[in-house]
Amino acid sequence: MGKLGKVTEDLAAAALSGKWGRELVRSELVLSAEEDAQPDPYLRYAYAVRHIACEAPIRILPDELVVGAATLRESAFHSVPVYKRDGELLSSSISHVTLGFSKMLETGYEGLRERIAVSRANKELSESQRNFLDACDLTLDAMQIWHGRYIKQLEALASGSSGERRAHYLQIIDNLKDVPLKRPENFKQAVQSLCFMFVFQRQCGNWPGIGRIDLMLGRYLEADLARGAITLDEAREYLAHFWIKGCEWAGCSDVFCGSGDGQHYQNIILSGVDETGRVVVNDVTYLVLDVVEQLRISDFPIAVRISRRTPEKLLRRIAEVQRLGGGIVAVYNEEFIIRQLTDFGYPLEEARNFANDGCWEIQIPGKTCFAYSPVDTLDALQRALGLGGAHESFASFEELYEAYMRQIRHDVDILLLNGDGWGKNGSANTLVSMFTDSCIENAKGYYDRGADYYVFSIHARGLPDVINSLFAIKKAVYEDKRLTLEQLLTYMENDWNGAETVRLAIRNGYVWYGNSNEEVDSFGKKVLHDFAEAANSKERKGVKRPVGASTFGSEVQASH
C-alpha cells in the first residue's frame, strides 16, 4: 500500500476532529413572498435550490485537491436549508436512496438538459408535469450558478498566487471547468465531477448513497495510467481528498454527527459483476481500501460484493482492512442477492447492478424510491402475553406462539395498507428526481411515481430479543417447568424483585441465539421464517414488498 502524504493526513484529521462540522453556518436563506406563494411544490423547491446556489457560503481549502463543500448547518439535519416566510424550513430532505451518479457522470448536466427538452416536447403533458420540467430546468440553472461561483473563486485565488500555489489552483480549475456540465475527460475530472454532484446534493439537505465507485471511476484511471497521465500514488491522493468530503459534517451535532454514527446514509459499494456479468475489480477498488485503511474514515461505509469469482487478492485485502475494526468494511453475498432480485422480478442486467441504499438495504441505484417500516416483534410478544394488563394463559407453547403470530399479522396488515400509497405525494425534490431514471421522461417526481421502482420493505425489529424471549418461555415454562407462565409474567412486571435466583437460573441455564447452538439457532430461523411468511406480499399497488430484518434505530441509547 502506498502511503498518503502529510497534507492529506492533516486535512483528514481536521475534518475528523469536527472542525468543519462545528463551523457549519446556520442558514439565513428565506423564500421571497412571491416564491413562497407559488402553489406548485416543485417550482417552490427549485426556488429554494436557487437561493442555496446563489447565497450559501462556499469553501475552498488551500491544499485540497477536490473542491465543493456542504456548509449549511440545516443540511446536516435532513432538511432543505431554506426557510418559508412563516419561519419553518421548507421541507425534510431525502435519504435511503442511492442516486444515478453513474449515468450523470457519463452524460453531465448537458444530458439532463437534453432529456428535459425531449420530455417537454410531449404535447399531452398536464400542467403539473410541465411545472415539474420547468422546475428541473430552474434547478439545473442553480446547479450551474453554484459551479460558476466556485470557478470564479478559484480564478481569484489563482490570480492572487504564484509558483506552486498558483499551479495548484490552475489544476483544480482545469479539473472543474467542464464538469459536471460535461462528461469527464480523465480521472481527476471524474473524481471532481462525482464529488461536486454529491456535495451539492448534501448542500441541499439530501443524504444519498453513492453506489459503485470503482465501476464508475475505474475506466478513467485505467486510461490515464495507460497513457502515463497519472500515477497510482496521485490517484490515491485524489480519492483520499474525496473521502475527506464525506466526514466534513463530523462534530456538527449530537445526532448524526458522522464518523460512525449514521454517516448521513452515504454508502459506497465496491466490486461485484457489471450488467454483463464481468467481475469488476480494478485499481480504484484497491485504492479505496488503501484510503480507508490509512485515514480510518468511516463516514463513507463500504460494502464489498463478493462471490466465488472474487479474486483471492481482494478477499485478503478486505480482511486486512476489516481486522482494524471500526465497522468500515462489510461484505455482501453477491450471488445470493442477485438470485433473490431476479426471483423478485428484476431483470438480470439490473439485478447485477445492485447497490445498497444510504443505509444497508438493497436497491437498484438511480432507479428506486425506497422506504422501510419496522414491526416491533418484542412489542407484539408483550401484547400477546398481556404484559401490563390482563395476563393471557396458554395450554401449550404452540398456542402462545400462534397468539404472538396473530399480533405480527395484525401489525403487518396495517403496514401493508400504508405501503399501498408509497411514492405518492411526498416532498417535492427536483434534485433527487433528476438523478433518478425515468422521472424526467415521465415528467413526474421521485415521490409522484416517476421512478422505475417503488419499494416498501416491512422489517422485523428486535428479532434477537424476541427469539431469546420465546425460547426462554418455551424451555423454562413449557419444557423444564421451572415456573408457570403467570409467575414469569408477574416477576417481569415487578422487575424480578424477590426472584433474582429464578432470573439468574433462566439467564444462565440456556444457550441463547447467535452462539452456534443448533437448537436455539434453528428456533431463531423458524421465527424469522414465520415473520417473512406473514409479511410476504411480493408486489401490490405498484410497490414491491421485500421482507427484511433490522436492528438499526432500536438500540438502547444513553440519556444526556
Image (spheres, rainbow, N blue to C red):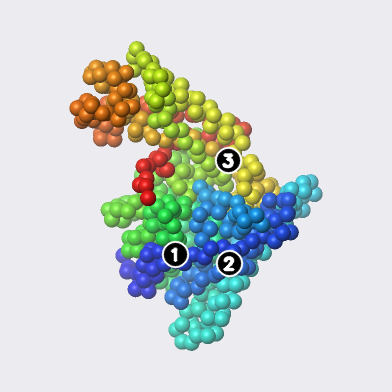
Q: Amino acid at mark 2?
A: Ala
In terms of secondary structure, where does tag 2 sit?
A: loop
Local packing at callout 2 (Cα closer than 10 Å; few below 14, some 14-19, many 20+) is: many
Does 58 sit left or right of 51 as displayed?
A: left
Q: Is residue 148 above or below residue 113?
A: below
Does 114 sit left or right of 95 as displayed?
A: right
Residue 284 in view here = no
Q: Residue at x 31, y 19 (%)?
A: 485
Residue 368 in view here = yes
- Check if mark 2's residue and mark 3's residue have beta carbons within 8 Å: no
- Residue 343 is situated, as x and y percent measured from the top left of the image, at 50, 34
Q: Which residue is mark 2?
A: 56
Instruction: Please tell me which residue lies in front, 183 or 289.
Output: 289
- Corner quadrant of residue 244: bottom left
The residue lying furthest to the right in this view is 123
Instruction: Please tell me which residue lies in front, 68 or 283.
Output: 68
Instruction: Please tell me which residue lies in front, 439 or 60.
Output: 60
Image quadrant in which the N terminus is located: bottom left
Local packing at callout 3 (Cα closer than 10 Å; few below 14, some 14-19, many 20+) is: many
Q: Which residue is mark 3?
A: 454
- Corner quadrant of residue 420: top right
Q: How far is the residue under mark 1 from the one under mark 3? A: 37 Å
- Residue 438 is situated, as x and y percent measured from the top left of the image, at 64, 48
Q: Amino acid at mark 3?
A: Tyr
In terms of secondary structure, where does tag 3 sit?
A: strand
